[in-house]
Image: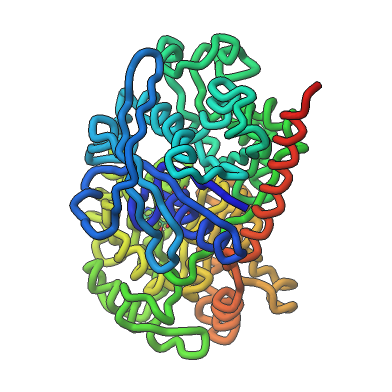
Amino acid sequence: MRILYAASEVTPFAKTGGLADVAGALPAALAGLGHDVKVVMPEYNGAKDKPGRYTPRGNINVSLAGVVYPFDVHAGRLPETGVKILFLSNSRLFDRPGLYQEKGKDYPDNLERFAAFSRAILEVPGLLDWHPDVIHCNDWQTALIPAYIKAHFPEDPRFTGTGTLFTVHNLGYQGLFPASEYPKLALPLEFFTPDTLEFYGKVNLLKAGLVFADILTTVSPTYSHEIQTPQFGCGLEGILHERSNDLFGIINGVDYQRWDPAHDPHLGQPYDSRQLQGKRLCRGLLQKASNLPVEEVPLIGMITRLTPQKGVDLVIEVLYELMMLDLQIVILGEGDPDIHVKLNEAMGRYPKKLSVHINFDESLAHLIEAGSDMFLMPSRYEPCGLNQLYSLRYGTVPIVRKTGGLADTIIDATPSNIASGKANGFLFEHASSHELLTTVRLAVKLFHEKDLWLQLIRNGMTADFSWDRSAREYERLYRLAIEKAAEKSKPE
Ligand code: ADP
């Protein structure tokens, strides 16, 4: 199959979260199954300064509502995989310090930026004379693609029978804009109704994907059910429920080339499940890097966007009680400025037990995975979550809220799961600071039962979440999307 994979961020070129990790790894897994895959992303600030990666491939001009958007197209490869990636470059739209925002404020022209990018993607096949069987779109930034196919290419042989699959990585981000921006999309007025892109008087770009893509997926089975309920549906549960026959949950995989303690260039101290000595050394390195005393106490790590979704406020609520336990906590994250302030204040109060790094630091993230004994994810909702999967491989026992992908991947250390040798972490049911505290207390207690703890570590480290299995599921759904597209293009 020829697969065009469209994403607004791709590791290692640009990343704000899990989408980048997925977009940097799934295409390679698909190529490994024998498919012809090309990835397409915007060319952000600074990319041009890294020569050697790019060959010019021509230009694209798209015109939306009378505005012309010129793009230069450069071709490169995903490192270590050989998969082709196309960078669409328009300096007015994408030469900026941030991907979607700066200093916590969204760029005011995000609708225009990602509409132009999405529309330009549909000119790439013509430019390359390479026509995809399926286009895989991700999140609101590329959700318009199926709508543009329908509106701008009706009965065009270049796209008849091209399947579209749309993945929701996080329903909390919908690409909402004032209705007055709608004309800039150059879509027909009949696409601005409650059944299409309108959402309570606003334009909702994510809905374009939900309404017009042939197949919908999200990144775990549990989340695919949760989002059909008012509690998790963010107002879109109705349409998701309506399309439940086309909606599938596929758990993300892990790129073990990047995330494996046995050959992680960020560590300096490799280790594996048979030889854990290096992990202890990593804890010492992490303690030093975090200005914490180098001691034999359980160390809890967190790496997270600092937003209400991730439940950091629950940790802050019971911080005093946590700090009374014999443990240390290291937090790496950035996000809401008021959470920054609260965490920095807390670090001032407990400098020997709590270390907070407010920034985005890929290398430190690897060291935290390796040097921590436990990894805390008290998320209010979690579509898939990658850090708990990285933690498993790094022998860092996850303590997570039972939701979304966390519920699908972590097996609670209950007496029966321990007895059957399956447990790999700790789960708590509700987004409550009290339950979080009780669960951390239990984990700290079991940490001192050396044999049992070693069993938890080994269960995690030997689990296999490689991309291969998930890629095969996407392969099946691409075929389904193509069948549906063919069905639609048949004369009535
Ligand atoms: P989300 O996409 O909701 O942010 P995921 O768990 O799916 O959550 O993916 C988060 C990814 O971003 C992980 O690879 C994580 O290590 C990384 N990450 C998040 N915050 C930071 C940070 N401050 N520094 C480095 N990496 C981070």
Give the residue furthest to the right. 492
Residue 398 image position (x, y, % from top left) = 52, 65
Residue closer to the observer: 346 or 59: 59
Point 62% across, 55% down: residue: 251
Q: Is residue 31 above or below residue 202?
A: below
Across the whole image, how many numbered discs are drawn on residues? 0
Residue depicted at 64% across the width and 45% down the height: 223
Front residue of 219/141: it is 141
Residue 253 visible in image: no
Percent from the top left, x then y, of residue 83?
Answer: 45, 60
Percent across and percent down for residue 310 are: 46, 46
Return the x and y of residue 260 as percentages of the image width and height.
Answer: 45, 74
Farthest left residue in view: 49
Residue at (57, 74) in percent of width and height: 460
Q: Quadrant of residue 213?
A: top right
Residue 178 located left or right of residue 474: left
Q: Quadrant of the C terminus?
A: top right
For the question of whether residue 83 can be seen, the reply is yes
Decide if residue 312 is on the left or right side of residue 167.
left
Which residue does the image show at 30% across and 72% down from the upper left? 286
